Amino acid sequence: MRTNSIRTAFTVLAAAALTAVMGTASATPGPAASAAPAASHPAKQRQAPPVLVDCLWHPDVRPTDFILACGDGNSRLVSLHWSHWNQNSAVARGVNMVNDCKPYCAAGKFHSYPVVVVLDHPQQWKKRPQLQHYTRMTLVYTHDHPDGYAHKVTYPLWN
């Protein structure tokens, strides 16, 4: 029971932090704003691989974990091992941890489902036009999948 209370508290705090950050995200420049201007190395900038943008609008390359359900954290990818990451797509194996929300999400249990993660459809990121970011994620469940999910699920990623 104590684990569920800690998990619930963490989820509430994460949601509050996300709300605070999202409210100021457009007014606060990210870490790359202080980097050298893109014009100084235009060829190098075009060759940089696309990034994966997380819930807090941070770009990442080959993250080991990724939250899918930004609002409540009830679905996340963990133990990601990337075998491929280039200009067009990225592929990883990992685990999708999904809360069964039974009898309700705060009292639910997380279950693990092995997945293959595919990122594709890179486009210019509106927040940081010098970066490309993947705009689509496909999860392919290699064994069981959560109730209500298909064997293969595709999500649009935020811009």
Image (spheres, rainbow, N blue to C red):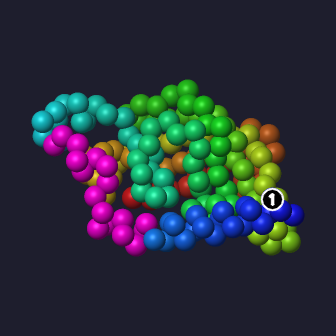
Residue 67 in the image: state x and y as whole percent: 59, 54
Within 10 angstroms of label 1, few (less than 14), some, or many (20 or more) residues? few
Q: Amino acid at mark 1?
A: Thr
Magenta part of the chain: 21-37
Q: In the rendered image, which quarter contains the C terminus?
A: bottom left
Residue at position x 57%, y 48% from top? 66
Instruction: Please name whichever residue, 16 or 61, is drawn nearer the observer in this view of the structure.
Output: 16
Residue at position x 76%, y 69% from top? 106
Residue at position x 45%, y 38% from top? 61
- Residue 7's place in the image compared with 39, above or below, is below
- Residue 115's place in the image compared with 105, above or below, is above
Instruction: Please name whichever residue, 146 or 128, is drawn nearer the observer in this view of the structure.
Output: 128
Residue 131 in the image: state x and y as whole percent: 30, 45
The quadrant where residue 2 appears: bottom right
Task: Assess whether residue 46 is covered by the magenta stretch.
Answer: no
Q: Is residue 146 visible?
A: yes
Q: What residue is disc 1 on?
A: 3
- Residue 138's place in the image compared with 126, above or below, is above
Residue 14 in the image: state x and y as whole percent: 58, 64
Query: Which residue sits furthest left?
Result: 40
Task: Assess whether residue 28 is covered by the magenta stretch.
Answer: yes
